């Protein structure tokens, strides 16, 4: 494993903006999907024999579809959040290193060593 560390914060920030945009879009799509699925709730009927046969399975599928869509939205949000935290760490490390370089250039080495 290499001891080198390389990161381009500007590129990560651009990717992060895209992830948040995707996350927002997915969230809106999930909301629309859930509302559309709810609107079809009564399609199999309510009290007849067909409804009694179909509704339990249809309800499970509807709930499963909604849960999957919500989980996908949350996963994208989680990746974006984790990337945001990593970016903050990268920028902090970069700033600390640049500060150390500046301090080293400003303060003369008085120990006699080079």
Image (cartoon, rainbow, N blue to C red):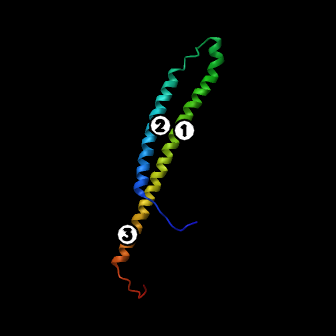
Point 42% across, 62% down: residue: 92
Report which quarter residue 48 is drawn in.
top right
Query: Which residue is label 2 attached to?
Result: 26
Q: Residue at x 53, y 43 (%)?
A: 75
Residue tagged by mark 3?
Answer: 99
Of 53 and 18, the residue lying toward us: 18
- Residue at 61 percent across and 23 percent down: it is 58
Indicate which disc, 2 or 1, sits on the residue closer to the N terminus.
2
- Which residue shows up at 48% across the image and 44% down it? 77
Q: Is residue 66 above or below residue 114?
A: above
Name the spot of residue 11 as percent of width and height, x first. 42, 54
In x, y percent, where is residue 56? 63, 22
The answer to whether marks 3 and 1 mark residues whose Cβ atoms lie closer than 8 Å is no
Q: Residue 71 has which mark? A: 1
Up the image or down, 53 lies above or below 114; here it is above
> Horizontally, is 93 left or right of 1 in the view?
left
Q: CA distance from mark 3 to mark 1?
A: 42 Å
Q: Secondary structure at mark 3?
A: helix
Q: What quarter of the picture does the N terminus occupy? A: bottom right
Image quarter where the C terminus lies is bottom left
Say whether disc 2 or disc 3 marks the residue closer to the N-terminus. 2
- Label 2 vs label 1: CA separation? 11 Å
Residue 89 in the image, given as x and y percentages of width and height: 45, 59
């Amino acid at each position: 494993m290499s001891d080198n560390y390389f990161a381009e914060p500007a590129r990560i920030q651009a990717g992060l903006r895209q992830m948040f945009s995707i996350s927002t879009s997915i969230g809106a799509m999930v909301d629309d999907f859930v509302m559309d699925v709810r609107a079809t709730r009564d399609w199999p009927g309510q009290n007849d024999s067909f409804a009694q046969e179909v509704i339990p399975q249809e309800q499970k599928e509807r709930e499963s579809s909604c849960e999957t869509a919500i989980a996908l939205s949350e996963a994208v949000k989680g990746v974006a959040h984790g990337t945001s935290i990593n970016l903050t760490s990268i920028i902090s490390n970069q700033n600390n290193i640049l500060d150390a370089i500046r301090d080293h250039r400003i303060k003369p080495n008085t120990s006699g060593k080079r």
